Image (cartoon, grey):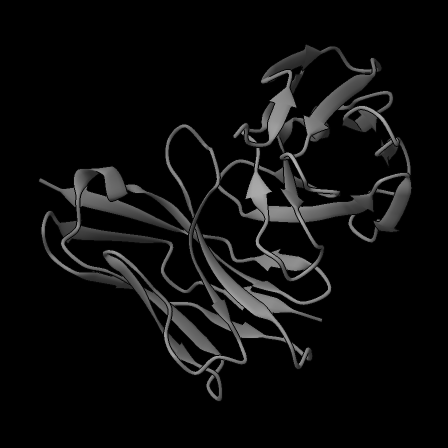
Amino acid sequence: AQTVTQSQPEMSVQEAETVTLSCTYDTSESDYYLFWYKQPPSRQMILVIRQEAYKQQNATENRFSVNFQKAAKSFSLKISDSQLGDAAMYFCAVSGDKIIFGKGTRLHILP
Amino acid sequence: NAGVMQNPRHLVRRRGQEARLRCSPMKGHSHVYWYRQLPEEGLKFMVYLQKENIIDESGMPKERFSAEFPKEGPSILRIQQVVRGDSAAYFCASSRYGQGETQYFGPGTRLLVL
């Protein structure tokens, strides 16, 4: 069985600062993918970043990067230079035979 | 490039009625997934379909819920005899190659059961 734990229900960060959202997971799959999705108030699910578990190099997409620690089963998301438009729910997910989502972290951006 | 389309965006039903939710995957995608999201919660997997086949329905309630993805036309999630507890956002996602690949989500259908 796969599980995803996001231990921070809510976080706040000052605009232009950096914030890290934590995620731990458990899976028995040997080959899997990890994702961060963003859900703004519109409730559209938007892919932020994806990491293949077999790759050691951390994925990066512009201001978004991950810290993937495979042995620790940790997959945190770092947002640099936070912007007001980053305010949203962020969901961590792991994909093996199906995608399992965490409960989410609500991120507030303080102007 | 059109993304994943879902309709209707909002659906109101009275208890005991049927709800039909439609999903058209992205062009070139033949794998469709349905998820349910209750307020203030994450998405819960319901069912995974390929054209004309149900691959994994382990997240589907045993009664009243069914899903199909016919050879032609959109995928349909059908809820018979809806109850208030069915009120939720239902999201459809699609991928090109199947499980493990990035899934692209539609805007969701908000179902409200009165």
Which residue sits at x=62%, y=30%?
B88
Q: Nearer the viewer, residue B45 or A35?
A: A35
Which residue sits at x=65%, y=26%?
B87
Q: Residue furthest bottom?
A: A71
Residue B70 on image: x %, y %: 88, 31
Quadrant into which the C terminus of chain A falls: top left
Quadrant into which the N terminus of chain A falls: bottom right
Q: With B47 as the anchor, is A50 left or right in this view?
A: left
Which residue sits at x=53%, y=76%?
A53
Q: With B5 as the anchor, is A52 left or right in this view?
A: left
Q: With B114 as the anchor, is B52 left or right in this view?
A: right
Q: Is B114 placed above or below B77 here?
A: above
Q: Nearer the viewer, residue B27 or B18?
A: B27
Q: Is B113 placed above or below B59 here?
A: above
Residue A75 on image: x %, y %: 42, 72
Q: Nearer the viewer, residue A106 or B91?
A: B91
Q: With A33 as the anchor, is B46 left or right in this view?
A: right
Residue A12 on image: x %, y %: 21, 51
Q: Is A35 placed above or below B64 here?
A: below
Which residue sits at x=90%, y=44%?
B53
Residue A49 on image: x %, y %: 41, 57
State which quadrant residue B36 falls in.
Answer: top right
Q: Is A80 placed above or below B103 here?
A: below
How many numbered marks does the figure carry?
A: 0
State which quadrant residue B21 falls in.
Answer: top right
